[in-house]
Image (tube, coloured by chain):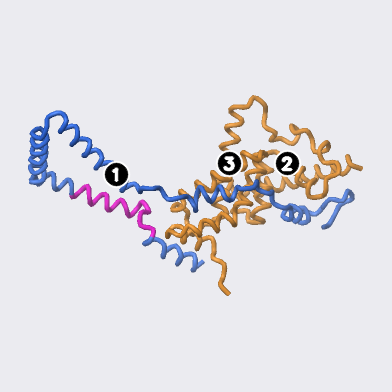
Amino acid sequence: MRAEPTDGDLVTMTLGGDSEGFATLVERYDRAVYHLAYRTLHDVEEARDATQEAFFKAFRSLRTFRPEAKFSTWIFAIAYHACCDRLNRRKHFASEELPDRADASPGPENRVIALDEASRLRAAIDALPEKYRTVVTLFHLQGRQYEEIATVLGLPLGTVKTHLFRAKEQLRRLLSAMEVTES
Amino acid sequence: MKMDGHGWPSADEALERAILELPLEEPPKGLRTSILLATAYRPAPAFSFPELAVLGSVGAVALWLVVMLVLGGGDLFVHTLATIASALSRAFSNAAVLAWLGAGGATALWLTLFTGSQPAALAPHRSERSASR
């Protein structure tokens, strides 16, 4: 049985002129990249555009990809920066404050009645401040690879761990509050 | 999943597991197709850049020829051509001009080694490194 090509092999294939390599990379990561974009931007159209932009930029600058790096981390970093650009533009053009603070959102209590466990957890994540929400989203995508998360966000490893710790604390509080409200 | 009194995970690990088990967002229909059409399956342009440069040059010379013929007939065209040929032959018989051309060409060749314009040469290094990881 033939082994699946690694991401590095697919990058090499693409650079060698075989575009199927990049097509496979798109198939592997488009959903995860869209997830990151949607969880960051909370807008289907903007998330779609940011995902396309991320893959387009990655394709154009594939030669700058370092072979010792992970493709997933690289594409997530490109996507995250595309999302940040969009958020900055939103902040620049919109007069209202972005819902990046837990207490600035309408409150999960009003939104989560009759939602299942996963939906409640997702609603609680949405209610987190932006910086915590992004760390949790990347934790969801990359697992306990804290160094990779730090690379995507361009933050020190310690900051990522602190953000994740605080995010989990807030999540527990929010989830408990939701349960109390429902009961 | 280990739950607290409210039915939610109390332990750090259980909460982490719950996060990791969340399903990914469903991307909109056609997203993958549009990404592929903009990247891997992007139709090749009708002409490459060097081809466009050659075509543009040929077009410019043709236009110049037409203008010369319209303005002054064959004599003006022949005279201009002779002037250009003599200027070029004088330039290329000058050692300084040839030295500068050589230096420019060598620099351009040297720069291509750093611009990734030779993927075929780099490719084996990349795969060797990933295989050794």
Mark 1 vs mark 3, CA separation in Å? 33 Å
Q: Quadrant of the N terminus of chain B?
A: bottom right
Within 10 Å of the Cα at label 2, are there few (<14), some (14-19), or many (20+) other Cα atoms?
many
Which residue was labeled with disc 3?
A: A49
Pointer 2 and pointer 1 on the same chain: no
Within 10 Å of the Cα at label 1, are there few (<14), some (14-19), or many (20+) other Cα atoms?
few
Q: Colour of chain B?
A: blue
Pointer 1 and pointer 3 on the same chain: no
Judged by depth in the image, the label closer to the viewer, 2 or 1, is 1
Residue A11 at x, y percent in the picture: 49, 58
Which residue lies at the image location 46% right of the left edge and 48% below the top edge? A60
- In this view, the residue in front, A132 or A138, is A138
Question: Could you tell me the amino acid type at mark 3?
Answer: Asp
Which residue lies at the image location 80% right of the left edge and 42% below the top edge? A174
- In this view, the residue in front, A131 or B104, is B104
Q: Are marks 2 and 1 in contact (CB under 8 Å)?
A: no
Which residue was labeled with disc 1?
A: B53
Which residue was labeled with disc 2?
A: A126
Residue B94 at x, y percent in the picture: 8, 44
Pointer 3 and pointer 2 on the same chain: yes
Q: Residue A28: within the magenta?
A: no
Mark 2 vs mark 1, CA separation in Å? 53 Å
Looking at the rendering, the stretch of residues picked out in magenta corresponds to B102-119
In the displayed image of the protein, which residue is found farthest to the bottom?
Answer: A1
